[in-house]
Amino acid sequence: MKILIIRFSAIGDVVLTSPILRCLKTQKKCTLHYVVKSGYSKVLEHNPHIDKLHVFNNSVKEVLSELKSENFDLVFDLQNNAKSWSIKSHLKTKTHTVDKKNWQKMLLIHFRRNVLKDHVVDRYFECIAKAGFYNDHKGLEYHIPSTVSVDYDVSKPFVVWSIGASFYKKKLSEKQILEVCNRLTCRVVLVGGPGEQELAASIVKKTVNPSLHNFCGDLSLDESAYLVQKSELVLTNDTGVMHIAAAFNKKIISFWGCTKPSIGFGPRVDPDRSITVLSNKSEFPCSKHGKHCRFQSDGCIKTISTDEIYDAIIEMGYS
């Protein structure tokens, strides 16, 4: 059986499909293809369950011809948008599409009524269950090549702090991060993309913590994942690194403002390994992806106190 998985983006969303790939591959020994945007293909390049990646830059038209030539037996659409529907309409094969529960999300965001009781991974499994597959409950995966390493002493305990996010309103501020780092005695490494370089450099310059190291903008995704894998604890905004940490079953402290775990994207780990620190402005999300905040222009995540963050670190056994 040849199966196509459709999920275009983003890093965390693609990581969340990893248990689906494992179960499809192991339960029926299928040949597994995956179509993804080029910016997120790195998440999947070393996944042993995938037989072939179909990567496009801007338009799905770039891969339509090669997809049609594969003669898939089954398509699982885990994206469920106009582009994925375009692919399905051209392939003309049997498909199952994830229920993204968008109206339930809108009910939660706009009317503050929560009827969502599941995680997005559960929604993915509901989709593939229609074809006889089931959840093996073995969690998320992220595969790093054995050749990957970072010039940092990972033999001693350290904490990873992922300071980035897709939108500014989802990020803790420099003041919050700096004040917490100044209270810590443990080793801390800052990870993030090029967009966090200036923020991280400022934090390192101002901190009194001599064990703070800045890797923002200097590492590949796999190298950042390597540090996450070797760490004792991960502090993170609502971002892809949070899901990579869950794939390694790390202890996670996550910070939430405009988005909330109730939408279905919280850390997929056992409850005793996760602390979610929420803005006290509201238990409900302001927006689906964190682009908008109903309370303040810089995002209500900025109202989380440094005491709350520090106390969560203490609760996890670090300081």
Image (cartoon, helix red, strand yellow):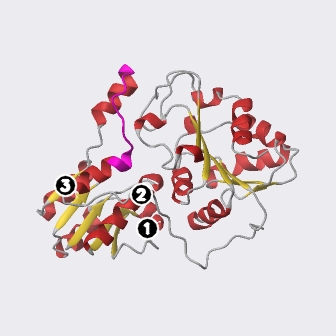
Question: How far, Cα to Cα, is label 3 from label 1?
Answer: 24 Å
Q: Nearer the viewer, residue 306 or 220?
A: 306
Q: Nearer the viewer, residue 222 or 232?
A: 232
Q: Is residue 53 left or right of residue 294?
A: left
Residue where numbered disc 3 is placed: 130
Q: Is residue 118 above or below residue 90?
A: above
Q: Is residue 33 visible?
A: no
In the rendered structure, which amino acid carries the disc numbered 1?
Leu
Residue 119 x, y percent position in the rendering: 39, 43
Q: Residues within 10 Å of mark 1 (few under 14, many from 20)?
A: many
Single out the residue that lies furthest toward the bottom.
147
Question: How far, Cα to Cα, is label 2 from label 3?
Answer: 21 Å
Q: Residues within 10 Å of mark 3 (few under 14, many from 20)?
A: few
Residue 100 x, y percent position in the rendering: 30, 43
Check whether the beta carbons of the residues at disc 2 and disc 1 lie within 8 A of each other. Answer: yes
**Element assignment for label 2:** helix
Q: Nearer the viewer, residue 154 or 162?
A: 154
Q: Which mark is residue 14?
A: 2
Give yes or no for residue 154 being in the magenta stretch.
Answer: no
Residue 174 x, y percent position in the rendering: 72, 38
Residue where numbered disc 1 is placed: 44
Q: Is residue 194 left or right of residue 268?
A: right
Span colored in magenta: 111-122
In the rendered structure, which amino acid carries the disc numbered 3?
Lys
